Image (cartoon, rainbow, N blue to C red):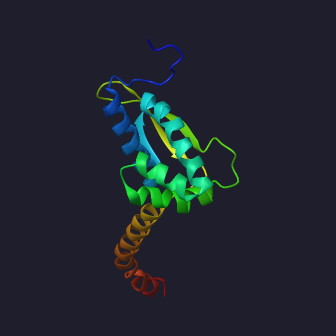
Amino acid sequence: MRHGVKKAKLQRSASHRNALLANQACSLINHGRITTTLAKAKALRPYVEKLITMGKEGSLHARRLALAELPQPAAVKKLFAEVAEAVKDRKGGYTRIVKLGQRKTDSAPMAFIEIIDLPRETEAPTEKATTTTTTTASATAEPAAAPAPSEEKAAE
């Protein structure tokens, strides 16, 4: 019987659910924000917040416990170095869930979950693409400016 157990099953076996949460936690730590279904985001939140608390502790024992939970050692390294440093002044509530609406294919409610104080790296490539487009547009605009001297001659 499941008396008092408040963990979402997510229609998976225990081993599959643990693997899902561990992989999503690694993705969240590596990227800072992931898009998933609302149910998975709500199940992931307490899992990740406990890991971040371990990262803030910073001891060797906490690092070994995190390595036992997460399948990617690089994610554990980032958790203890960058994520723990970013949220060191926060006492809890390290993640935020924002609802995005329904997925078009199966109408599943979607959300993204993000680590609040972690700086975002995904915004920089978008700006580069915009400046490249602007440079291309200005290069095509220069030949249109060439007939301007003939207009000056006509004005004389």
> In this orientation, does residue 89 appear?
yes
> In this orientation, does residue 121 appear?
no
In this view, 106 is above or below 46 = above
From the viewer's perspective, tell me whether residue 60 is left or right of residue 20.
right
Relative depth, front residue between 15 and 86: 15
In this view, 96 is above or below 43 = below
Residue 81 placement (x, y as % from top left): 54, 63
Relative depth, front residue between 105 and 75: 75
Farthest residue, direction left: 105
Residue 25 placement (x, y as % from top left): 43, 45
Q: Going 55% across and 42% down the picture, which residue do you hit?
A: 50
Farthest residue, direction front: 61
Q: Going 61% across and 54% down the picture, which residue do you hit?
A: 56
Q: Going 70% across and 45% down the picture, which residue do you hit?
A: 91
Tag count: 0
Q: Write down the quadrant of residue 134 in the picture.
A: bottom left
Q: Going 54% across and 59% down the picture, which residue do you hit?
A: 60
Relative depth, front residue between 124 and 153: 124
Q: Write down the quadrant of residue 85 in the picture.
A: bottom right
In this view, 1 is above or below 73 = above
Residue 41 placement (x, y as % from top left): 46, 34
Residue 1 placement (x, y as % from top left): 43, 11
From the viewer's perspective, tell me whether residue 24 is left or right of residue 83.
left
From the viewer's perspective, tell me whether residue 105 is left or right of residue 9.
left
